Amino acid sequence: MVPAFDYTYRPPASPGLQQIHARVRDADLLRQLPEVQAIDGLFALPRRVHYVAAECGEFGAFYRPVEAEVVLCYETLRTLYERGQAHQRALGLPDGHPFRYVRANVRFMLLHETGHALVQLLDLPVTGRQEDAVDQLAAILMLRFASLEETPAEVIGNLRLAANWMLSRSTGAYNLDAYADEHALGEQRYFNLQCLVYGTDPERFAGMVEAGDLTAARARVCPRETRQASRAWLRLLLPHLAPGKEVYLDEARRFLDQRD
Ligand SMILES: [Zn+2]
């Protein structure tokens, strides 16, 4: 029996978070994330990973290595919803936009934290910043394992909402703490993610450069960056496929055999 994931909604103490808790518990939000479902059971992990929605006292999502817990804070859902509303108003987007914004960002955040979990549990080698590496993994998983009902345009749209969130959190006013942080600056994470999107299909996304969503200089290297990140993660993860999941080997080998 291969350990997989489990999903828990911890009741919050704060009265202000009761409604959010009830909503995500009733909707079983953690089981509605297609990429998390797709990789549940995909890898031979040494222990079970727990996906937990909880009150944290602050905004955030994180991985707790001792407990092997990927934690999504209820506070995060509230903040994302508000940001989604502001985004909707600013751009005159349809009514469903705030929920779409929350969902896209929750997917990206939990996949980012899942990346930290995989690095720890599978003892994967990482050189450079782990934060950058797991941002790449989150994007790659969203490109590969989105739900079957989603069009490629919707998948890309979700990634760009995650990029928007990174940019929206940034004030642009930085100090030593920000420069020293283990995460890249919000603007850099934004452009890194845009680059991964652009790199999947430079012709289709030529408009991103024209719109200023990516500089022409960076855009030139994005196809290679996207390919390199995908190949690296694939090679790191393939040896850890769970028994019975060998069906992914052929697809992976075909991808890895493609030369630049
Ligand atoms: Zn992280």
Image (tube, rainbow, N blue to C red):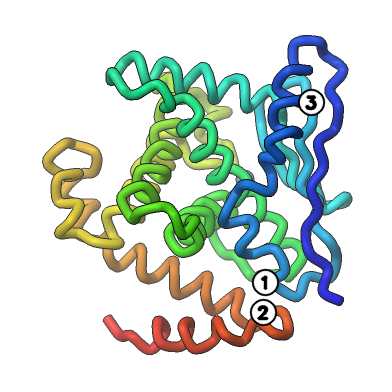
> Quick one: label 1, few (<14), some, or many (20+) residues within 10 Å?
many
Mark nearer the N terminus (3 vs 1): 1
Quarter of the image containing the N terminus?
Answer: bottom right
Q: Is residue 207 above or below residue 21?
A: below
Tell me where residue 166 appears, x and y as whole percent.
45, 33
Q: Secondary structure at mark 1?
A: loop
Quadrant location, ligand no. 1: top right
Residue linked to disc 3:
55
Tell me where residue 15 appears, x and y as whole percent.
81, 10
Beta carbon at label 3 within 8 Å of ligand 1: no
Given residues 185 and 92, the one toward you in this image is 92
Q: Could you tell whether 210 is left or right of 19 in the image?
A: left
- Give the distance between the C-alpha atoms of the residues marked 1 and 2, in whole angstroms: 6 Å
Residue linked to disc 1:
42
x 46%, y 33%: residue: 100
Beta carbon at label 1 within 8 Å of ligand 1: no
Amino acid type at circle 1 is Leu
Are circles 1 and 2 on residues that touch, CB within 8 Å?
yes
Tell me where residue 106 appears, x and y as whole percent.
58, 39
Residue linked to disc 2:
241
Tell me where residue 178 appears, x and y as whole percent.
53, 30
Q: Is residue 98 above or below residue 68?
A: above
Q: Could you tell whether 147 is left or right of 44 in the image?
A: left
Amino acid type at circle 3 is Glu
x 48%, y 82%: residue: 252
